[in-house]
Image (spheres, rainbow, N blue to C red):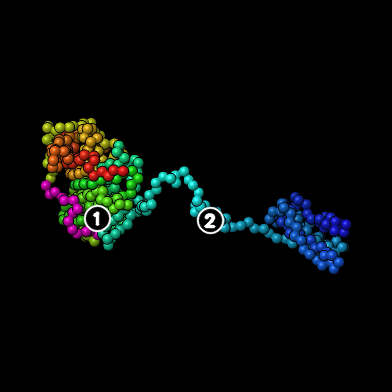
Amino acid sequence: MTMAATSTSSMAFLPSTSSLAREPVNCWMVTPNKSNFRKKAIPVVHPHAHPQNNEEHADIVKPAQNMNCGNGTMLLPKRRTIEPPPFRDLLLSKMSWVVAASKSKWTRPYDNIRQSKITLDPCGGKMVQGGLVFRQSFLIRSYEIGTDSRATIETIMNYLQETKLNHFRAVGLLDQGFGSTPEMTKRNLVWVLRKMHVVVDDYPRWNDAIEVDTWIFPLGRDGQRQEWFIRDLKTRKPIAKATSVFVLMDKETRRLPKFLEIMRRESEAHAMKGDPIVPVENTKLRRLDAERADHVRTGLAPRWRDLDVNRHVNNTKFINWIVEVIPQSILESHELHDVNIEFRRECGKDSSLRSLSTEVRDDLGDGEAKEGIEFDHLLLLEDGSEIARARTKWRPRHSGIATD
């Protein structure tokens, strides 16, 4: 009975629930321990207490601080502020949980899909071989393949252009102008592609990872030569190689000025020395006789998205107009493995073009089987002005194609 009275008497001094909802209080009950009345502390914390200073609560607690219940039991309130855990601790705990979950053996719907354990660097690339060769890897996307689930020739040429610009950026030669060095920017000059020769050994498939190496060569007073080598990132098997010639163009006059000595010295420290990986033919491609062309396609027009930042048709789009005129029977039975293009004039948004081609060689290999076909090509404006000329080589689709 004494202990019951003690509890009732002591609880009478506790503040109401409404008061505790605004202020935390730790109340210590001091109770007698059997016959020797040794004091023992028992914490009592209201479940609805919240940290908040309140004068009303302070007035309630003060009279009870020295209150003696007369039977050896006293109410000794002790104020304490309960702080929430810091946000940083909460964030770290959540991150630790996520890391632990990722290491667990959870099964996901895509775990059984073939995953490529290859590290790619599509956003940067790196310099190798003493800082003279730029290397970048790519993954073949679904929108970069054709009807045979392989990358198209336009995709290959897009990778060549991308790595060229990233190479110049990596060595500090890419200034404010798109594809312009600092000295070129001062003179309002840009690079334009004059020649391009691409040889494809094997087109990569969708989801294949490839590695592109590129470097530059000085080219006397005419401009600069850029070369590329593409390999399979996993098997190291060669895929393609290419060489090109770039010249300068004045953005205002659209003319081709000479390659100045100061600009040559600007890139000389980053240039390779040696023979080209694809033989460069000094002779120009012969002009196709438009009156005797075997295949003609008219009414070709650039689309707005075909223009680049120099406001002319990007060189990678020309290959589509060249291939457009090839008969469908050859497109289905053969694949393009060699293309040599000479760009004669820039093409603007409002241009209207004709694409012409003539078959010039057949049965390139030994034996009775047909090993390949060659075409001469010509791109003309409607007024007869020459845009580009090219030669393409086609091989049967079974040639150079690995089977699954």
Residue span colored magenta: 270-283
SS at badge 2: helix
Count of numbered badges drawn on the protein: 2
Q: Examine the rendering and report whether any part of residue 313 can be seen.
A: no
For residue 79: magenta?
Answer: no
Residue at image point 59% right, 57% down: 86
Q: Position of residue 74 (x, y in %)?
A: 82, 62
Q: Amino acid at mark 1?
A: Trp
**Vertical relation: 49 (above or below) 154:** below
* Residue 278 covered by magenta stretch: yes
Using the rendered view, name the quadrant where residue 25 is placed: bottom right
Q: CA gap, disc 2 to disc 1?
A: 45 Å
Q: Which residue is mark 1?
A: 215
Quick one: quadrant of the C terminus? top left
The reply to whether residue 267 is visible in this rendering is: yes
- 147 to the left or right of 75: left
Tell me: 41 left or right of 180. Answer: right
Q: Position of residue 353 (x, y in %)?
A: 21, 34
Q: Quadrant of the N terminus?
A: bottom right
As shown in the figure, which amino acid type bears the numbered disc 2? Ser
